[in-house]
Image (spheres, rainbow, N blue to C red):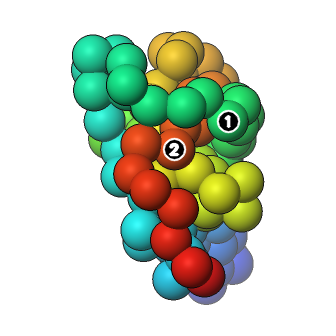
Amino acid sequence: MKRILIAVCGGLILSSCAWVKVTPNGEGVRLVQSARAVEPCKKLGTVNTKVVNKVVFSRDMEKVAGELADLARNEAALMGGDTIIPISEIIEGRRSFGVYQCFSSRTQ
């Protein structure tokens, strides 16, 4: 019985860990917090991201925020963007980001 409990608890802990990897193109996308930073930029659109924020217990909000930003960076790169800015708060593991092109186009 003790082994089953340990296995179940271990599985729950591991399932609450999510690793979002930034793609090579996503690495070229910067995250800014100030709307002033994107004023001279061209808005390309919006991305909506979602990660698991709670399994049995709430996950660390800083880790959730980082994973949401990493997902947004990957999506922004696919759109041709080089800058993202959060445009919503984190609610139930979801967040929206504005995608901008602030620098001259790069060849990919």
**Earlier residue among tags 1 and 2:** 1
Q: Secondary structure at mark 1?
A: strand
Relative image position of residue 97 (x, y in whole percent): 57, 30
**Residue at image x 31%, y 36%?**
32
Kind of residue sitting beneath label 1: Leu
Quadrant that contains the C terminus: bottom right
Q: Circle 2 sits on which residue?
A: 101
Relative side of 64 to 91, left or right: left
Towards the viewer: 97 or 95? 97
**Residue at image x 51%, y 83%?**
24
Residue farthest along the front direction in this orientation: 104
Contact between labelled residues 2 and 1, with CB atoms less than 8 Å apart: yes
Kind of residue sitting beneath label 2: Gln
Q: Circle 1 sits on which residue?
A: 44
Q: Is residue 13 visible?
A: no
Q: CA distance from mark 1 to mark 2?
A: 7 Å
Q: Residues within 10 Å of mark 2 (few under 14, many from 20)?
A: many
**Residue at image x 42%, y 68%?**
28
Quadrant that contains the N terminus: bottom right
Relative side of 48 to 102, left or right: right
Relative image position of residue 104 (x, y in whole percent): 44, 56
Q: Secondary structure at mark 2?
A: strand
Q: Is residue 40 visible?
A: yes
Relative image position of residue 5 (x, y in whole percent): 62, 70
Towards the viewer: 40 or 75? 40
